[in-house]
Amino acid sequence: MRSKPPTTLASALHRIGLNKLLLHMILIVVSTVTAAPYFWALSTSLKLRRDVFTPVPQWIPSNPTFQNYLDLFYMAPFGLFLLNTIIVVSGILIVQLVTAPLAAYVFSRLRFPGSGFLFGLFLVQMMMPIHAVVVPNYLTMNALGLLDTRLAMMLPFWASGYAVFLLRQAFRQVPRDFEDAAVIDGCSGLRFLWHVLLPLAKPTVIAFSLISVVTHWNDFLWPLIVTDSPAVRTLTIGLAMFVQQESGADWPVLMAGTVFVTLPLLVLFLVYQRRFIESFMFAGLKG
Amino acid sequence: MRTAKGNLSPYLYLIPSLVFLVAFTYYPIFSSVYISLHEWNLFTREPVFIGLENYAILFGDTLFWRVARNTLVYVVGTIPLTMVMALVMAILLNERLGWMRNVYRVAAFYPTMIPMAAAAMLWVWLLNPGIGLINHYLMQLGLPRIEWLYNMDWALPAIMLTAIWKNFGYFMLIYLAGLQNMPGELYEAADLEGANFFQKVRHITLPLLAPTTVFVVVVGIITSFNVFDLVHLMTQGGPGNRTNVIVYYIYQNAFRFSDYGMGSALTVVFVVMILIVILVLMRFLERRTHYEV
């Protein structure tokens, strides 16, 4: 729902002698500045090493080459890092999509002794970052013998207060009558949740899923602490280790690595731009 | 709301979530309190009870206060700038701009989609003292070259700049969502009164965005307290601990020096800080909501 204020910034600027052109100019400058860092990395990753040190920066490589990407794959197993990332990210999301609807269903539909307190536990977790408790969680993983496994990277995220919170809001929008009708048809509890509530909450499910994927694709501290060998490392950790290993500052290859780590999500984002932007807006508002 | 008396089923639905919630959020809080009362490092085979000694050492250490200061400077420095940029961009982007609007939105928002670790690398390259782009353009403008991440005074601001670039697009989107829910009638009334653009921003837009702003501040504070990736990849806390922040300091103690006792004491201090922030903000949010409704 949007209604436009009749006097826009453009017309206000017009009144003081400026116009929409100025607005576009400001936005073009800002956009250029924010886009430049990535564009520069992309450009660097396609350069010969000698073209990096030119006295005038080459925004467009004069001798474009993909060699740096080939070198990257030769120097570190980035394909494996990508695979590990996909496994960890989907492993987290799939379990979250089981645990969260169950909890959200109960909180949205039933009142029972302790429900307020229990929901509070979820709310606090939503705001309590994993960063705060990495030390004890590391010791737990150590005690469970799970260090250096992909499972260790997923476990702490299998309960998501944020998902429960978002889904509870969505389930509450579903009118009471729906449930009464469903109960009469002999569809209650789990089946009602699966066949009625979840399909109706689809926008929330998609929004949360996208946010979960982006968040965990980008995870860093936790995977850094619990992994030790390249076999289980994810892209972000792979990149960090690669940076340390390549301290000789081979910038074209380092930038090729950086671009490779970001590329899958950025391509998805550009293709499904509207969906991503709406999801982040929507989930932010609800949060 | 249906009430379920003497029925166990609601709890059954909660068990899958509660297992992980307890194991990885609540148990850790209590276990770190317990471990923090022990000496437990490379030289002790097993945790040895020492009472509050870890805390005494911690609070007596000037480095801890340096770290606390850095974290505070980072939080207080990044949030207002991020918010102002996000708000101004959102107000500008809420105008009729045609198809270009999408381009601007993507340009501002794409940093949200990339890992902090990647953002760190992009800026390490831009901020390179010798051949970095930023110093190149500074010198073209006749300004002195800056050693950025190697300079005691510039390293933290450089990291803050990276964080602002990375985060403002997300908050811009939240503000845009807030702006799109504005009631048109108020603006129409203001137009009838002959209010100009800036008066309307001041008296209608900003007050109505207050709840959005509270949300932005909450998320902003919590994410900035957790800054780690940027520090780890850009400076490793240096030079001279000028960019060492609380989470990095925890990491150093627990995983570089294998001092779990001290790492846990720091964890406790950090969790208490975060809980205070959460409680204060929840109070604030509650009052807001009542006021709104």
Image: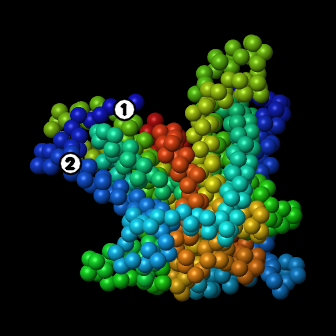
Q: Which amino acid does label 2 sit on?
A: Leu
Q: Is mark 2 on a helix, strand or loop?
A: helix
| A284 to A147, vertically: above or below | above
Q: What element carries label 1?
A: loop
The span from disc 2 to disc 1 (Cα, nearest Å) is 24 Å
For mark 1, what is the residue?
A: A2
- Between label 2 and label 1, give the one nearer the viewer: 2
Residue A231 seen by the camera? yes
Quadrant in the rendering for residue A77:
bottom right
Q: What residue type is labelled 1?
A: Arg
Label 2 environment density (alpha carbons within 10 Å; few <14, some 14–19, many ≥20): few
Expressed as whole percent of the image width and height from the top left, the position of residue B23 reads: 79, 55
Quadrant in the rendering for residue A99:
top right
For mark 2, what is the residue?
A: A21
| Residue name at image x 50 percent, y 75 percent | A49
Residue B286 seen by the camera? no
